[in-house]
Image (tube, rainbow, N blue to C red):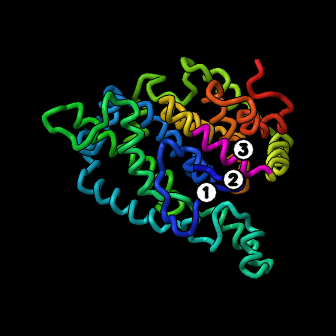
Amino acid sequence: MTGTLGGPTTTPSEVPVPYTLTSAATLGYDLVRLPGGRQAAGVLVSALRSGPAEWALLAAHHPLRTSDPAADPFLAGEDAARARELAETAPRLSQATGTPAGTDAAGAAAAAGGAPTSVAALAEQLRTSMVGSASALDRLVRHEAMDAGAAEPSALPDLEDPAHVDRALAADVLADAAVAAYAARQLPRALRRRLSEPYERAVAGSVPGTFDLAPDPRTPWGTQLRSLLAALRDLDAPGREHWRRAVDATRADRRPWAATMHDACWAAHASGRVPAAAAAQLLAVQAFADAGFDAGDGATGVWNAVSGCVQGLVVADLLGEDALAVLTEPWALATGAGLLAG
């Protein structure tokens, strides 16, 4: 769960924080600060929207199923294990400073003595350190995201049921691709490529639209979400600066924003919209990257501002006007228009 416009709510004792669909905004906070975050978000949306038909497509490209003689299942398993081991060396945000993650670099440096070099070092740590972990992402893919499209949660695969086997193999393909993108800093390029190839081949060989990475037009908020994401992607340098200034202008209202974001996430849970809200957050990760925002923007509040707008759209009919105004205020300040206008 995101806690302030500067960072998520977490403390040094929380190492690492598990990712959940309910708190997809926190996952987004990590992804927008990773070089492979955009790609990981796409894999996660594919997992969220997958069902038996997609599982069969993905399973067909698993090393156990593919006809490619170079795809050795034993070596593929070793690759996956090695990747997860290397991925766990990524720095944790709660290990970066002795202060809560929502504290900015200057505040953390002041607590540490205030040396200018401390400010620079802490700023870099806040830019690159993760709230969660690759293992948390793996669990999210296998045990939450894939079950979002299933009729009922899946446990161990029933080897007598081809659909269950397809799901288990598809989970491997999706989890490997997600970890490969998430841990791009820690993994050698060749290893990342081997892990992501089965997913990429499945997508490339599928009917267009099977792995659709766009807002669902059937939802009440689909059209407005599409417009929001398109507006982000169209941002130029002055537009990005407007967003940064909007974040600065709203920074004093951190507590109302945090409480309202919590309420909006709870509203998604209570209304059964968690998978839809999570998909919206992940699509926003991609738009954030396409807009030209960087890891520094993600670390210093711009992502949380965007994330709040997205969450507000998804549960707008369940929030009061005041709460919705809190979440969408950055949009109004950055664009001069109401997010729900039209």
- Left or right: 337 as drawn, with respect to 270: right
Mark closest to the chain's N terminus, 1 or 2: 2
Residue extent of the magenta highlight:
253-265
At which x and y percent is residue 172? 33, 46
Q: Quadrant of residue 280?
A: top right
Magenta segment: does it hold 261? yes
Is the residue marked by circle 1 packed among few (<14), some (14-19), or many (20+) residues within 10 Å? some
Q: Earlier in the sequence, mark 2 or mark 3?
A: 2
245 relative to 99, above or below: above
Residue 77 lies in the magenta-colored region: no
The amino acid marked with disc number 2 is Thr
Q: Image height check: is 76 above or below 325?
A: below
Badge 1 is on which residue? 9
Secondary-structure class at tag 1:
loop
Q: Nearer the viewer, residue 71 or 226?
A: 226
Q: Residue 4, labelled with which disc? A: 2
Callout 3: helix, strand or loop? helix
Q: Which mark is residue 305?
A: 3
